[in-house]
């Protein structure tokens, strides 16, 4: 719950809409009316159409997402770790936090959060789910505030089990893990009794063959790296592509002028 990659704090539809907004901002920088930019202009019109069509829904989704974070803050979930830089800042003493206080704040927030407009369907769904689950499970959720040492989640336990599971998969070879992909598409296991012997094993691989397979690996990883950059920094990625396109168009125009001069 305290990771952006885990539900419900990560909403793919909202993130996708925000990525489209950044892509549209980068495409709006293309102002050249030449034939080479017609595709980008058509793409921009399509992106603007999709953004305009879903703007109301995206605003509703964003508001619901903010209310969800308010709910997590009201529950003090997840608890923020105390950093060295924050030690000087005033913190709420642990003795002042109780199940009764959390329940009062939650009930007050539920009274404030009451969407009724027909354009707030996502917020209404969130409100109905919150009201229903709070009425059913409020008492079970509040035990952790009155019991010292009882965590509000089991993320640390899940992380421990995840590490043990990945380690077991690594040493048994029964199933690959995502971490193994970072080392490439193939791995070589050397058996050596010293670092010098290991170095001799590695040097048996020809340098040309090593460069060849490294290049093939880089080419295979290029699409995944591009989509990763597009997801994390859509504006910068599209802006780089647009800059390359503009430079390419300029080179083609200069080449066309040079060819016409040589022909004359």
Image: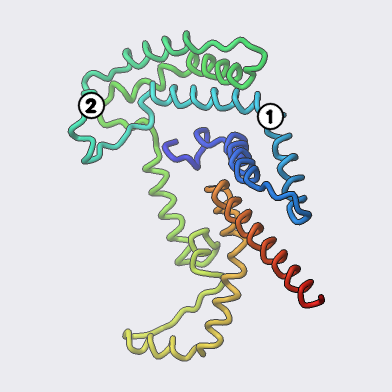
| Residue count near mark 1 (Cα–Cα under 10 Å), binned few <14, some 14–19, many ≥20 | few
Question: Residue 192 appears in which quarter of the rendering?
Answer: bottom left
* Residue at the (38%, 43%) spot, across then down: 157
Residue 59 position, x and y percent, is 59, 25
Residue 2 position, x and y percent, is 42, 37
* Residue at the (79%, 71%) spot, across then down: 260
Residue 77 position, x and y percent, is 38, 29
Kind of element beneath mark 1: loop
Q: Residue furthest front?
A: 264
Report the side of 167 relative to 262 (left or right): left
Spatial CA distance of label 1 from label 2 is: 41 Å
Q: Name the residue nearer the viewer: 112 or 96.
A: 112
* Residue at the (41%, 83%) spot, across then down: 191
Disc marking residue 91: 2
Camera-nearest label, 1 or 2: 1
When the figure is inspected, residue 148 is found, relative to residue 237, above or below; the finding is above
When the figure is inspected, residue 139 is found, relative to residue 47, above or below; the finding is above
Disc marking residue 54: 1
Q: Residue furthest left?
A: 88
Q: Split into 4 quadrants, where in the image is the N terminus?
A: top left
């Amino acid at each position: 719950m305290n990771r952006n990659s885990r539900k419900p704090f990560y909403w793919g539809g909202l993130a996708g809409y925000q990525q489209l907004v950044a892509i549209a901002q980068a495409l709006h920088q293309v102002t050249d009316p030449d034939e080479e930019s017609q595709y980008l202009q058509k793409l921009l019109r399509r992106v603007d159409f999709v953004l305009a069509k879903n703007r109301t829904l995206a605003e509703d989704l964003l508001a619901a997402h903010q209310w969800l974070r308010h709910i997590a803050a009201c529950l003090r979930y997840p608890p923020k770790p105390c950093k060295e830089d924050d030690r000087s800042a005033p913190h709420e003493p642990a003795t002042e936090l109780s199940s009764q206080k959390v329940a009062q704040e939650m009930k007050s927030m539920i009274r404030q959060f009451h969407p009724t407009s027909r354009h707030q369907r996502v917020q209404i769904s969130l409100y109905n789910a919150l009201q229903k689950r709070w009425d059913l499970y409020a008492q079970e959720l509040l035990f952790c505030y009155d019991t010292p040492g009882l965590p509000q989640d089991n993320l640390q336990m899940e992380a421990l089990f995840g590490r043990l599971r990945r380690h077991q998969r690594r040493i048994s070879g029964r199933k690959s893990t995502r971490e193994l992909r970072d080392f490439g598409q193939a791995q070589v296991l050397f058996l050596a009794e010293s670092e010098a012997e290991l170095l001799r094993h590695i040097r048996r691989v020809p340098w040309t063959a090593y460069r060849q397979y490294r290049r093939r690996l880089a080419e295979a990883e290029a699409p995944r790296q591009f989509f990763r950059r597009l997801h994390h920094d859509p504006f910068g990625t599209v802006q780089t592509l647009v800059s390359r396109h503009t430079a390419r168009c300029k080179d083609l125009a200069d080449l066309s002028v040079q060819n016409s001069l040589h022909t004359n």
